[in-house]
Image (cartoon, helix red, strand yellow):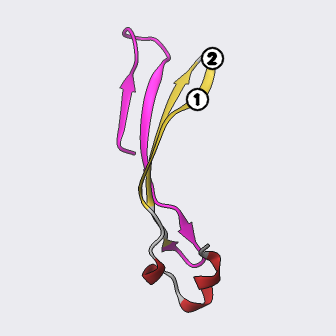
Amino acid sequence: MKSIKRVDAFRRFDFLITIDAQPIIGPHIPVGEDILTYRISPAGVELKNFEHLRGPNKDDFLPNYQNLLK
């Protein structure tokens, strides 16, 4: 979890939540890094921003997982 911010006035249920995510594959091999920002309010949950920081690096994959890269 990177940050949580209340959007509007004090005591309203309206938040921006920013998450730093590391997707994994197989036996816990990290394959990248992403930052996602969600807005959570009484109206529902909405993805506000998606930022891809780094992608899968072929050197991070074990030989038997190389076929998953395209």
Please state which of residues 5 and 48 is positioned toward the viewer in this rendering: 48
Magenta stretch: residue 26 in it?
Answer: yes
| Residue 47 percent location from the top left of the image | 55, 34
Residue designated by label 1:
46
Give the amino acid type for the residue marked by disc 1 in the picture: Glu
Q: Residue at x 45, y 80 (%)?
A: 60
Q: Compared with residue 37, is residue 51 higher up or lower down, i.e. above or below?
A: below
Q: Nearer the viewer, mark 1 or mark 2?
A: 1
Q: Are marks 1 and 2 in contact (CB under 8 Å)?
A: yes
Q: Residue at x 63, y 17 (%)?
A: 43
Residue 67 placement: quadrant:
bottom right
Q: Residue at x 40, y 45 (%)?
A: 1
Residue 4 placement: quadrant:
top left
| Residue 64 percent location from the top left of the image | 61, 90
Picture disc at residue 24? none
| Residue 49 percent location from the top left of the image | 47, 36
Q: Residue at x 36, y 26 (%)?
A: 5
Q: Residue furthest bottom?
A: 63
Q: Secondary structure at mark 2?
A: loop
**Are there few (<14), some (14-19), or many (20+) residues within 10 Å of tag 1?**
few
Give the amino acid type for the residue marked by disc 2 in the picture: Ala
Q: Compared with residue 33, is residue 68 higher up or lower down, i.e. above or below?
A: below
Q: Compared with residue 5, is residue 8 higher up or lower down, i.e. above or below?
A: above
| Residue 17 percent location from the top left of the image | 44, 34
The Cα atoms of the two marked residues, 1 and 2, are separated by 9 Å
Q: Residue furthest front?
A: 70
Q: Bounds of the magenta span?
A: 1-29
Q: Quadrant of the C terminus?
A: bottom right
Numbered marks: total: 2
Picture disc at residue 43? 2
Magenta stretch: residue 35 in it?
Answer: no
**Are there few (<14), some (14-19), or many (20+) residues within 10 Å of tag 2?**
few
